[in-house]
């Protein structure tokens, strides 16, 4: 038995690997990020310069002795340098914010595109098996949270290191070893030790919050999609309770994170003001008031630079939790991958299905399906609900991993690019999904080179001509959110038209006429038969025997295996066959109506 290629989704990579991935994903944006770091450092140094000169001015006014290099400057020079530094600081700050945010937003746009294309690549199987609300939260909120990583992490971190190093070095050079060592210890405590306090709990709280966002999004989108059902059953309050209960399990974590944040802020205040006090004691003993004044005005803003580390460590936990969720989507490989060197698929040929099997989470739901579908023929796949019919259809177009062999025109479909396969073999699934857009956009879904006349002729084939004429804007009519303007039958026929416009070699219809009244259904079946007369092959999946009249072969599935197969007339001739019993049951249902 041949196993079609598939892999498992990506595992949680850990913080370092996530940061590596973020940087790799945006490698070409690193030069402007470095520029943002340089600008951030220069801004801090400009601030320090202004404070230093202001302190020198005060020392001059009150005629304090010492530090003549600064206090000896004339008032004109002092004021000129302060104004120049102020202007520089403004320009540098503007540049830092501009470049930092530009990098951040470009990176976010890139990450959003990456998530979309990864989800599209992994679709439909993997995308379907993820919860849609979670995926939505990842593609929107999580991506936004990563902004902290780009705009508010690296530049302040670099500035913190450089500012503290420069102030320590300058203090050592001007005032000696003692105050310099005191500052160095205080910087290490504020910039490294305190930010490490409770970091695990903060990380857990951030992941919990990210998870809750996903669940709440899921509940919200389910509620919107099923608003009629929820109103119909007066279940609004129950859904609201589900929404708020989703946050319950992480409430304790969030409170703990709040406490830790408070404790960290208090500790760093104690260290900052404690070191200032120590400097006062040290410089009073030396009787050096000018030194104390100058150092004090430098130390306070330098601590501000170092304390940003604590702030961004908190933001960074949130950002990393989000980045890990992005990573899990972005690097996951699809369960069904394209072959490395895909073979071309012939434009026409016979579809041969041998021993087709499929499983969900290790549970086999389909095995040993065999049939042959020739050009211009209809094969019917019937069976009770849950017998594996839709699974077989999805396995044929390689939407889900499968076993066995499927070939078209003699080429194994596992060796063909999925996009090429799905252009030749189209599955119209049970759910007739329309997107927000016009009728034309819904029919084409990005396909090019189809004229409006061709679209209208297909709609006419399916009995939608008068419906289209009644629409004010014709093919430009907007269908709106979840195409609420359409009836179930109209929606099904539009989904069918979307497939027929593409003129596939094989059309797989999975209960695609279930919402139609019998007159419209007959019209659709005639259209299908006409297409068959022109060479299209059809695999028709249905519960209803009455619509399978033209089928060359019927395959009956029971609990995932082929229970019987043959020409419909032969199966009907055997009164004990499952097929004839299904036909009798269906006729019995119809008879009392007559
Ligand atoms: N995504 C999935 N994950 C897990 N199990 C699934 C999934 N999709 C289908 N199944 C299971 O696989 C079995 C076959 O389902 P399938 O949808 O193929 O049946 P079906 O014959 O098309 O049913 P129906 O006529 O009701 O549409 C069922 O037991 C179903 O519960």
Image (cartoon, rainbow, N blue to C red):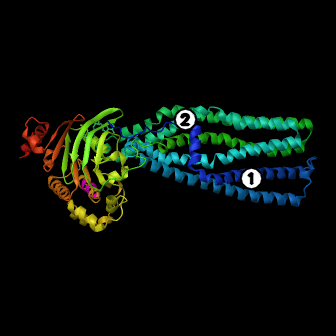
In the picture, the disc for residue 42 is 1
Q: Is residue 215 left or right of residue 78?
A: left
Q: Which residues are magenta?
A: 492-497
Q: Is mark 2 within 8 Å of ligand 1?
A: no
Query: Is 388 included in the stretch rendered in magenta?
Result: no
Taking depth in this image into account, of 233 and 146 the one nearest to the observer is 146
Give the mark nearest the N terminus, 2 or 1: 1
Q: Is mark 1 within 8 Å of ligand 1?
A: no
Taking depth in this image into account, of 404 and 159 the one nearest to the observer is 404
- Residue visible at 75% across and 38% down in the picture: 187
Residue 155 in picture, x, y percent from top left: 67, 48
Say what secondary structure mark 2 lies in. helix
Residue 131 in picture, x, y percent from top left: 40, 41
Residue 305 in picture, x, y percent from top left: 72, 45
Q: Quadrant of the N terminus?
A: top left
The answer to the question of whether label 2 and label 1 lie on touching residues, with beta carbons closer than 8 A, is: no
Count residues near mark 1 (Cα–Cα under 10 Å), then give few for <14, some for 14-19, many for 20+.
many
The quadrant in which residue 398 appears is top left
Count residues near mark 2 (Cα–Cα under 10 Å), then give few for <14, some for 14-19, many for 20+.
many
Q: Is residue 282 left or right of residue 345?
A: right
Give the quarter the ligand 1 occupies.
top left
State which mark lies toward you, 2 or 1.
1
Query: Is 495 included in the stretch rendered in magenta?
Result: yes
Disc 2 target residue: 205
């Amino acid at each position: 038995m041949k196993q079609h290629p598939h892999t498992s989704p990506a595992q949680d990579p850990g913080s370092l690997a996530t940061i590596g991935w973020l940087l790799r994903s945006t490698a070409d944006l690193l030069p402007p990020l470095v520029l943002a770091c340089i600008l951030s450092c220069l801004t801090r140094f400009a601030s320090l310069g202004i404070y230093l000169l202001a302190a020198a001015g005060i020392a001059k006014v009150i005629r304090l002795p010492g530090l003549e290099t600064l206090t000896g400057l004339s008032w004109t020079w002092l004021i000129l340098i302060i104004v120049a530094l102020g202007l520089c600081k403004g320009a540098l700050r503007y540049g830092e914010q501009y470049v930092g945010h530009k990098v951040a937003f470009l990176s976010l746009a890139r990450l959003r595109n990456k998530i979309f294309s990864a989800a599209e690549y992994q679709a439909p199987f993997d995308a379907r098996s993820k919860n849609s609300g979670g995926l939505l939260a990842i593609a929107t909120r999580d991506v936004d949270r990563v902004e902290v990583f780009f705009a508010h992490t690296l530049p302040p971190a670099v500035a913190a290191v450089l500012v503290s190093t420069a102030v320590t070095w300058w203090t050592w050079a001007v005032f000696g070893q003692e105050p310099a060592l005191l500052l160095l210890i205080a910087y290490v405590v504020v910039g490294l030790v305190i930010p490490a306090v409770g970091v695990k709990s903060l990380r857990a709280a951030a992941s919990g919050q990210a998870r809750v966002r996903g669940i709440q999004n899921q509940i919200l989108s389910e509620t919107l999609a099923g608003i009629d059902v929820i109103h119909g059953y007066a279940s609004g309050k129950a859904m609201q309770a589900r929404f708020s209960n989703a946050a319950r399990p992480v409430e304790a974590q969030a409170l703990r994170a709040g406490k830790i944040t408070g404790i960290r802020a208090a500790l760093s205040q104690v260290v900052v003001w404690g070191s200032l006090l120590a400097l006062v004691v040290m410089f009073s003993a030396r009787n050096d008031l000018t030194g104390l004044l100058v150092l004090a005005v430098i130390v306070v803003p330098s601590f501000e630079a170092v304390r940003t580390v604590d702030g961004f460590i908190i933001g960074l936990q949130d950002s990393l939790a989000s980045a890990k969720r992005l990573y899990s989507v972005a690097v996951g490989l699809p369960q069904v991958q394209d072959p490395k060197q895909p073979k071309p698929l012939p434009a026409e040929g016979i579809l041969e299905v041998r021993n087709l099997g499929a499983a969900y989470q290790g549970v086999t739901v389909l095995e040993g399906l065999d049939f042959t579908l020739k050009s211009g023929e209809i094969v019917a796949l019937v069976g009770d609900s849950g017998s594996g019919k839709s699974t077989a259809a999805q396995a044929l177009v390689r939407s889900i991993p499968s076993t066995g062999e499927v070939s078209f025109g003699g080429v194994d479909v596992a060796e063909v690019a999925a996009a090429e396969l799905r252009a030749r073999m189209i599955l119209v699934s049970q759910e007739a999904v329309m997107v927000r857009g016009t009728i034309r956009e819904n029919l084409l879904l990005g396909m090019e080179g189809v004229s409006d006349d061709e679209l209208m002729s297909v709609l006419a084939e399916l009995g939608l001509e008068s419906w289209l004429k009644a629409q004010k804007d014709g093919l430009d009519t907007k269908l709106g959110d979840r195409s609420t303007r359409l009836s179930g039958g109209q929606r099904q026929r539009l989904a069918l038209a979307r497939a027929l416009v593409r003129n596939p070699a094989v059309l797989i219809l999975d209960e695609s006429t279930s919402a139609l009244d019998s007159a419209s259904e007959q019209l659709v079946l005639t259209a299908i038969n006409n297409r068959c007369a022109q060479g299209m092959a059809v695999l028709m999946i249905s519960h209803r025997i009455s619509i399978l009249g033209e089928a060359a072969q019927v395959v009956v599935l029971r609990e995932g295996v082929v229970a019987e197969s043959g020409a419909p007339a032969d199966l009907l001739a055997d009164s004990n066959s499952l097929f004839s019993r299904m036909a009798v049951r269906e006729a019995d249902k119809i008879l009392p109506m007559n």
